Amino acid sequence: MSQRINPTKTKKRRSLTYLWIPLLAVVVFLLIYFEMTELLYVLATLGVTALLVIVATADLGANERSENAMPNAQAAGSGISSNPPKSSTK
């Protein structure tokens, strides 16, 4: 199944991301300026934890697809067949 990407939706997400960047920079600057390092530390820890959870759950089904598509990536990159010829023993 192919999914069509709506270009207006992508532009809206991108502009929302560009809005978040200066907003978060101002918040971090204010936390540093007013010496609220404990709050900054907690927010940074929660942010890193959220990022790790997102990365850990993002690629759950890719292992099945990659095994079926390319069983031996090293062999495919070098141009060598991943299935060696069967030797005949007499």
Image: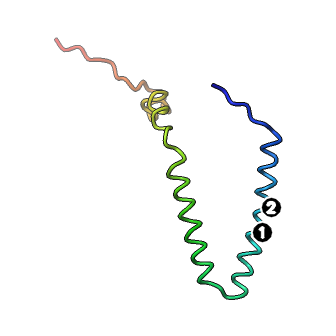
Q: Is residue 29 left or right of residue 53?
A: right
Q: Which residue is mark 1?
A: 23
Q: Is residue 75 left or right of residue 19?
A: left
The image position of residue 74, as x and y in percent, is 45, 35
Badge 1 amino acid: Leu
The image position of residue 81, as x and y in percent, is 42, 24
Q: Between residue 33 and residue 75, name the one nearer to us.
A: 33
Is 70 above or below relative to 33? above
Q: Between residue 86 and residue 6, name the one nearer to us.
A: 6
Q: Residue at x 52, y 44 (%)?
A: 59
Describe the colour scheme in one phrase.
rainbow
Q: Residue at x 71, y 88 (%)?
A: 34
> Outermost residue, bottom direction?
35
Q: Secondary structure at mark 1?
A: helix
Q: Is residue 15 left or right of residue 47?
A: right
What crowding class fits label 1: few (fewer than 14 Cα within 10 Å), some (14-19), or many (20 or more)?
A: few
> How many numbered marks appear?
2
What crowding class fits label 2: few (fewer than 14 Cα within 10 Å), some (14-19), or many (20 or more)?
A: few
Quadrant where the N terminus is found in the figure: top right
CB atoms at circles 2 and 1 under 8 Å apart? Answer: yes
Is 3 above or below relative to 12? above
> Outermost residue, left direction?
90
Badge 2 amino acid: Leu
Tell me, for residue 19, which label it has, or none.
Answer: 2
Tell me, for residue 71, which label it has, or none.
Answer: none
The image position of residue 14, as x and y in percent, is 78, 51
Q: Secondary structure at mark 2?
A: helix
Quadrant where the C terminus is found in the figure: top left
The image position of residue 60, as x and y in percent, is 49, 42
Q: Residue at x 65, y 85 (%)?
A: 36
Q: Residue at x 78, y 68 (%)?
A: 23
Q: CA distance from mark 2 to mark 1?
A: 7 Å
